[in-house]
């Protein structure tokens, strides 16, 4: 599931669809998709929307391409548009032994509605990522038509699209067929079940999540059974199904659904689980907005707006992981929202708007990795601020504060002091004072945009001074903009 799903929650109901003519999208028709053979090294983005683990490889959907690790997350490479991937942030990933499929989306400027998310189609590779083929977004307009999820079934590619519904291709995306999960004509404006968000292939059985419940097909999408909050005695908690997952353990299958309230006031947000093919559902992890699932043997992992959870008894009881803090680096995730999760040989990987983190001991210790530029290397300054411009009300929200990072490099053991000044060079705040950094390396300190009195500073340009004992003083600046 993608971060982009989160953005659409507020406009799910009601929903407005616009035509290609009305949108008047400012798209660059001359855009060229590259065929670069080698991906770039490292992570390129701190925004992680999806994690897929297949045969030991870890795939990350990020805000700047598709990242891959072959060594358990120790190192990464990133595929971008230079390799032939779609433009924008990755919104969906599917990986099998024979094909890798990636969808992405970006913002477009429209005449009447301002900036709107726009699907840039699908790219696929059949040679393990060496070469990629791009196909455009299907439908009358790519605007507000983003691919949220992808599933592979035999020679079929299934894609769920906001505005475009559930779609199937048998020729690797060259042509698509809209497949409503019922017997009605396709009507995403009037039929909530035609607004598609999630899909999985569970050993040949298709499970599809819409804004109208969970749909199941045993025959490749020819016929469907719908399970909603209203049509069962033990139903799902809510009809807006943002993610699905399959868990298999000791001959039994469990289908998990992230179920959120749609229109009915009796619906709630929770996780819904079935072990009898959808005939009955057990509701668990109530009042949590779940975004995705991962499984290893009997263990189930769920990422939510409120942290990472683990269950060893199929959702009957839960343990919540501790906040993500990398004690070795002295850093933490500046978010409570987690969008992606995967597990590889007992190590849990999770991602969100502030990077990717992993733990091998149930959250007792964490390792955080980010895609930041390395200060002091490859022509970069010894220190810089990001995000920049910075909004205390929007960026890196954690415990009612936004945060900006001051990234820097040390070349020896040192003590660090960072002070922030306004345009008149009056002291605004002291971020850290004489903080020990016992080894050379890349570090970051965070500022919450507040002055020494605890007030959020006014919009404007601020300067900060980084004092490294024994190395000197280095200056940077950050624009605060609400």
Image (cartoon, rainbow, N blue to C red):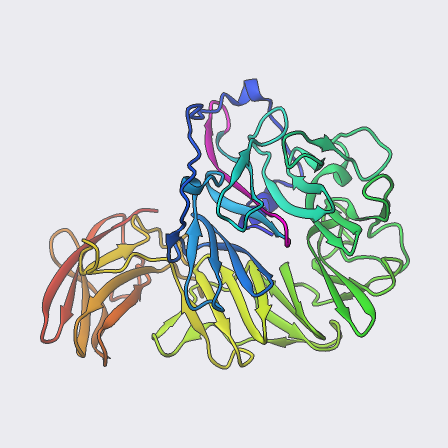
Q: Which residue sits at x=51%, y=56%?
A: 60
Is residue 431 covered in magenta? no
Q: Position of residue 357 (x, y in %)?
A: 47, 68
- The residue under the point 70% across, 42% down is 158
Q: Image quadrant of residue 42?
A: bottom left
Give the camera-side residue of 476 and 13: 476
Does residue 152 appear left or right of residue 47 in this picture?
right
Front residue of 343 and 333: 343
Task: Choose between 227 and 91: the one closer to the eye.
Answer: 91
Q: Which residues are magenta?
A: 96-113
Q: Residue at x 57, y 63 (%)?
A: 341
Identify the residue at horizontal 64%, vertical 73% (top origin).
310
**Nearest the eye: 143 or 55:** 55
Q: Is residue 257 visible?
A: yes
Count the labels in the image: 0
Q: Residue 284: x, y in percent? A: 74, 67
Residue 63 visible here? no
x and y percentages locating residue 427 in the rendered image: 15, 62
Asked if residue 251 lies left or right of residue 362, the reply is right
Image position of 286 with respect to 260: above or below: below
Q: Residue 334: where, in percent of width, then height?
A: 42, 64
**Is 432 rendered above or below residue 279?**
below
* In magenta stretch: residue 102: yes
Magenta highlight: main SS: strand
Question: Which residue is the extreme one toward the top?
Answer: 21
């Amino acid at each position: 599931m993608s971060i982009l799903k989160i953005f659409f929650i507020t406009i799910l109901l009601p929903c407005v669809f616009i035509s290609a003519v009305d949108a008047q999208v400012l798209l660059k028709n001359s855009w060229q998709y590259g065929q670069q053979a080698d991906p770039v090294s490292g992570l390129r983005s701190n925004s992680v929307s999806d994690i897929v683990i297949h045969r030991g490889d870890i795939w990350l959907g990020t805000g700047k391409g598709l990242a891959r690790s072959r060594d358990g997350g120790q190192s990464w490479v990133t595929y971008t548009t230079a390799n032939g991937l779609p433009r924008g942030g990755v919104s969906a990933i599917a990986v099998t032994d024979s094909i890798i499929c990636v969808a992405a989306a970006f913002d477009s400027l429209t005449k009447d509605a301002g900036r709107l998310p726009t699907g840039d189609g699908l790219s696929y590779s059949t040679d393990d990522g060496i070469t990629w083929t791009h196909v455009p977004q299907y439908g009358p307009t790519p605007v507000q038509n983003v691919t949220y999820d992808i599933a592979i079934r035999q020679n079929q590619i299934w894609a769920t699209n906001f505005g475009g519904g559930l779609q199937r291709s048998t020729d690797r995306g060259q042509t698509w067929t809209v497949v409503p999960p019922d017997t009605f004509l396709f009507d995403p404006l009037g039929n909530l079940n035609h607004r598609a968000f999630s899909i999985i292939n569970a050993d040949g059985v298709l499970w599809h999540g819409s804004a109208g419940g969970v749909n199941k097909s045993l025959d490749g999408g020819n016929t469907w059974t719908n399970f909603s909050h209203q049509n069962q005695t033990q139903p799902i908690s809510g009809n807006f199904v943002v993610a699905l997952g399959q868990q298999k353990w000791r001959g039994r299958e469990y289908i998990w659904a992230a179920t959120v309230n749609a229109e009915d006031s009796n619906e709630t947000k929770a996780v819904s689980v079935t072990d009898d093919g959808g005939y009955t559902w057990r509701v668990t992890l109530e009042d949590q907005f779940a975004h995705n699932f991962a499984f290893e043997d009997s263990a189930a992992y769920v990422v939510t707006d409120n942290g990472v959870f683990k269950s060893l008894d199929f959702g009957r009881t839960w343990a919540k992981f501790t906040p993500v803090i990398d004690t070795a680096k002295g850093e933490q995730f500046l978010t409570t929202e987690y969008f992606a999760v995967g597990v590889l040989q007992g190590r849990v990987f999770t991602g969100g708007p502030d990077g990717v983190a992993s733990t091998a001991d149930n959250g007792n210790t964490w390792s955080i990795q980010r895609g930041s530029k390395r200060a002091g290397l490859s022509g970069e300054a010894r220190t810089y601020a990001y995000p920049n411009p910075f909004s205390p009300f929007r960026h890196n929200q954690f415990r009612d504060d936004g945060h900006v990072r001051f990234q820097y490099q040390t070349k020896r053991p040192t003590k660090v002091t960072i002070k922030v000044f306004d345009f008149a060079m009056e002291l605004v705040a002291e971020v850290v004072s004489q903080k020990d950094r016992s080894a050379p390396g890349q570090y970051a300190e965070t500022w919450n945009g507040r002055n020494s009195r605890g007030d959020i500073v006014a919009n404007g340009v601020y300067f900060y001074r980084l004092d490294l004992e024994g190395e000197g003083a280095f200056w940077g600046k950050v624009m605060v903009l609400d």
